[in-house]
Amino acid sequence: MFVPEKRVWCWDGCRKPIPFAAKKCPFCNTDQPVPRTEEKNFDSDNDGMPDWWEKKYGLNPLDPSDADKDSDGDGFTNLEEYLAGTDPTDPNSHLLLQPN
């Protein structure tokens, strides 16, 4: 069974994905900063959705393309669902649009 480990980009050298707790990059041997504790709104892939929220709903916190996907087929992207505070896995949980 494959269990992915948390990864970050190499801090300064080659910018390849390396283990979160690495002290040196295994590819370019660049020293890495001391690991920080994960902030509440830390967003590894900079897609606008924090890692904790992506993990909660089965999205990939290292894949920025999942922000534009519509996981539940309700016409709203995952990013729109995050911003609205709705559940991206429930088609009945979405923004209610006001009629003109």
Image (spheres, rainbow, N blue to C red):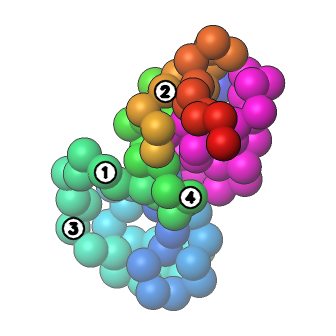
Q: Which mark is residue 88?
A: none
Tag 4 and tag 3, C-beta contact below 8 Å:
no
Residue type at mark 2: give it.
Thr
Check whether the beta carbons of the residues at disc 4 and disc 2 lie within 8 A of each other.
no
Name the residue nearer the viewer: 14 or 37. 37
- Residue at screen point 57% across, 78% down: 15
Where in the figure is residue 22, as x and y percent of width and height?
37, 61
Real-space Cα distance between discs 1 and 3? 19 Å
How packed is label 3: few (under 14 Cα within 10 Å), some, or many (20 or more)? few
| Residue topped by disc 3 | 34
Q: Which residues are magenta?
A: 58-82
Nearer mark to the viewer, of 4 and 2: 2
Left or right of 40? Residue 54 is right
N-terminal label among 1 and 3: 3
Q: Amino acid at mark 1?
A: Asn
- Is disc 3 in contact with disc 2, using a CB cutoff of under 8 Å? no
Q: Give the image location of residue 12, x and y in percent.
A: 45, 86
- Residue located beneath label 2 in the image: 86
Q: Nearer the viewer, residue 65 or 98?
A: 98
Q: Earlier in the sequence, mark 2 or mark 1?
A: 1
**Depth check, front residue: 37 or 21:** 37
Quick one: SS at disc 3?
A: loop
* Residue 1 position by quadrant: top right
In the rendering, which numbered label is found on residue 47?
A: 4
